[in-house]
Image (spheres, rainbow, N blue to C red):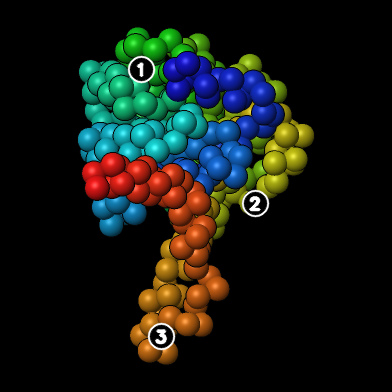
């Protein structure tokens, strides 16, 4: 079954579908093992975690592909990928679809910000015209090599142009073949409801922390018709805080002892990695060589 089809199946079976950010292969394995059904590679995550860069459109398609491959090699869960603005014009967007499909992604979201993009929850975002965004979606749909590859149109228009203009844009993207709408930086539940009432495809709510959107629960979002809930950087933020505490503790206390409780144990790490079955294989091989 293709990754795209797996994603569609997960969506059909889970309403709303929770999509959790996994910034690397190992966190994807943990998300899978605890029972999540879909995972996400954040553009901010690639920029921040893999390259130490801000989320300002500075990473390349190849940078993101590398992280996709690492994650899809380690986990069978369908992976939704942040494609930012698609890395250029129609031919670049076509390459993005084809290369991400080859790398094992289930689908992507492409947004209507200008190439010099910002995080969706920052002020002063600039967006391209509705026509240019529709052209981005058409280029993506036309380039599909797997009919199930999931194409999500993200609109950042809410901030600058308001609810109705954002819904109009979303409708035009659906007309052009988008499978779903990512309503970025929406604040109120009533606004999510307006999107889902007006549009006949799943709506994604981005419940990223410390941004424009309150931390609505899955139940609250389900009640207003949201089809997917995204937690793009939640685990990443928690990992960062834990790591910072360890670095500070080692420096200030001369030992990591007081931070041990915040750590995953060796046994837990090995469990997620299935370490012992690898070691057993090695032991058997070693015996045979004796
Ligand atoms: C979803 C997002 O595009 C991402 O790259 O993860 C970001 C998340 C964030 O910065 O909190 C966005 O919303 O722009
Ligand atoms: Mg992003």
Secondary structure under tag 1 reads helix
Report whether residue 154 is seen: no
- Determine the CA span between mark 2 and mark 1: 31 Å
Residue at which label 1 appears: 140
Other-residue count near label 2 (Cα within 10 Å), few / some / many at <14 / 14–19 / ≥20: some
Q: Is mark 1 within 8 Å of ligand 2?
A: no
Q: Residue 170 location in percent, x, y?
A: 52, 23
Task: Name the side, left or right, on which 24 lies relative to 213.
Answer: left
Q: Is mark 3 within 8 Å of ligand 1?
A: no
Report whether residue 222 is seen: yes
Foreground: 191 or 280?
A: 280
Foreground: 264 or 187?
A: 264
2 vs 3, front mark? 3
Residue at which label 3 appears: 255
Foreground: 185 or 274?
A: 274
**Residue 103 appears in which quarter of the rendering?**
top left
Name the residue located 38 percent from the left edge and 76 percent from the top edge: 247
Q: Compare marks 2 and 3 and give the one earlier in the sequence.
A: 2
Q: Which mark is residue 54?
A: none
Residue at which label 2 appears: 215
Name the residue located 49 percent from the left edge and 77 percent from the top edge: 259
Foreground: 140 or 146?
A: 146
Secondary structure under tag 2 reads loop
Name the residue located 63 percent from the left edge and 16 percent from the top edge: 200
Q: Compare marks 2 and 1 and give the one earlier in the sequence.
A: 1
């Amino acid at each position: 079954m293709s990754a795209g089809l797996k994603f569609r199946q997960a969506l059909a079976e889970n309403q709303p579908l929770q999509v959790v950010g996994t910034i690397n292969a190992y966190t994807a394995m943990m998300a899978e093992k605890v029972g999540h059904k879909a995972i996400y590679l954040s553009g901010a995550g690639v920029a921040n975690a893999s390259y130490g860069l801000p989320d300002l459109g500075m990473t390349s398609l190849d940078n993101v592909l590398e992280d996709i491959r690492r994650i899809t090699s380690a986990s069978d869960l369908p992976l939704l990928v942040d494609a930012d603005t698609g890395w250029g014009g129609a031919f670049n967007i076509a390459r993005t679809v084809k290369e991400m499909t080859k790398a094992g992604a289930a689908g992507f979201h492409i947004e209507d910000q200008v190439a010099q993009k910002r995080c969706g929850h920052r002020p002063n975002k600039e967006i391209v015209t509705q026509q240019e965004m529709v052209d981005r979606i058409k280029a993506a749909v036309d380039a599909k090599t797997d009919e199930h590859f999931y194409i999500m149109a993200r609109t950042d228009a809410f901030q600058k142009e308001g609810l109705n203009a954002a819904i109009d844009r979303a409708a035009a993207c659906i007309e052009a073949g988008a499978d779903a709408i990512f309503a970025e930086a929406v604040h109120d539940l009533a606004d999510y409801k307006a999107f889902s009432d007006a549009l006949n495809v799943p709506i994604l709510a981005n419940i990223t922390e410390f941004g424009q959107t309150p931390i609505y629960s899955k139940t609250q979002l389900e009640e207003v018709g949201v089809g997917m809930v995204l937690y793009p950087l939640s685990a990443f933020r928690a990992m960062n805080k834990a790591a910072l505490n360890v670095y500070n503790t080692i420096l200030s206390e001369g030992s990591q002892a007081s931070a041990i409780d915040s750590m995953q144990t060796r046994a837990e790490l090995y469990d997620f990695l299935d370490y012992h079955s690898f070691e057993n294989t090695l032991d058997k091989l070693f015996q045979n060589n004796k």
